[in-house]
Image (spheres, rainbow, N blue to C red):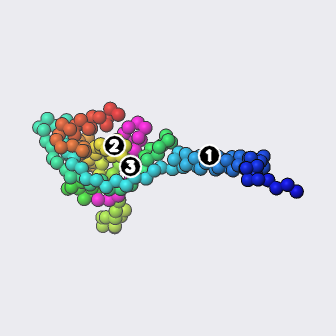
Amino acid sequence: MKFLTIDELKNSDFVKMKNREKKRHILIATIVIILIIVLCLYFFPIPWNIDRKVSGIQYRNADTSGYYEKKAIHIKGNYKHYLFQNQEDIFTGNVIIDGYDTTKYEFRVFIDSKNKYSFGEIDSFGYSGPNDQFNVQTFGWVKSKPFLKEFSIHVAEPIGTDGNQWSGNKGLIIAAPASNRQEAITIEKSLDNS
């Protein structure tokens, strides 16, 4: 029986075959892992926690008197962003606006990041009235760019006997981030033109 030297053993067909098999297994495992990651990124959103404070401006649409009021706004919640899928992003959380108690409640906004803006609703839910009835109070409707970088809220106000609505003629708008009326109007218009 002949024994092989170390150099002969390293160069043998058997060892070369085993090395090729190892490389093939590593390549297949790498491809499978990459495929799983890509599929996860496609089907599942990436969650982002948002906790920031911005200054906003409240003003009346089509008001020529120049009325505006500064508002401190605290955005806190979870933003889910889909990288590859043509699906709306989702913000669930609070947009707390000074002077409005109804904004303390959590709400959900669907943000169509593919079209660069969204339209969602801020509602507060609760029991009230003489029979402790469940009711929903709409604070307003939100338009936003992805990640709530710029947004406006059309504030619902009592109009006649129809309950809370928004008037395009003289409705109340809160836009952020803005430090003056003109910036707020520019943000509102940019969200309409997105």
Q: Residues within 10 Å of mark 1 (few under 14, many from 20)?
A: few
Q: Which mark is residue 109?
A: 3
* Closer to the camera in the image, 10 or 57: 10
Q: Earlier in the sequence, mark 2 or mark 3?
A: 3
Which residue type does callout 2 highlight? Ser
* Proximity of marks 2 and 3: CB atoms separated by less than 8 Å: yes
Q: Classify 10 Å Cα crowding around label 2: few (below 14), some (14-19), many (20 and above).
A: many
Could you tell me if residue 127 is visible in this image?
A: yes
Mark 2 → mark 3, Cα distance in angstroms? 9 Å
- Disc 2: which residue: 144
Q: Which mark is residue 31?
A: 1
Q: Which residues are magenta?
A: 104-118
Q: Residue at x 41, y 47 (%)?
A: 110
- Distance from disc 1 to disc 2, alpha carbons, whole Å, reads 38 Å
Horizontal and vertical percent position of residue 18: 74, 50
The amino acid on which the numbered mark 3 sits, given as a three-letter code, is Val
Image quarter hosting the N terminus:
bottom right
Per the image, label 3 sits on a secondary structure element best described as strand
Residue situated in front as seen by the camera: 143 or 124: 143
Residue lying furthest left in this view?
A: 65
Q: Secondary structure at mark 1?
A: helix
Going by the numbered disc 1, the residue's amino acid type is Ile
Q: Report x, y in % for residue 78.
A: 39, 55
Give the residue drawn at x 25%, y 59%.
101
In the image, residue 134 sits, relative to residue 72, either above or below, namely below
Where, by quadrant of the figure, is residue 137 drawn? Answer: bottom left
Give yes or no for contact between labels 1 and 3 (Cβ–Cβ under 8 Å): no
Count of picture labels: 3
Give whichever of discs 1 and 3 has the lower sequence position. 1
Q: Is residue 41 left or right of residue 170?
A: right
Considering the numbered disc 2 on the image, is that residue within a helix, a strand or a loop?
strand
Residue 15 visible, this angle: no
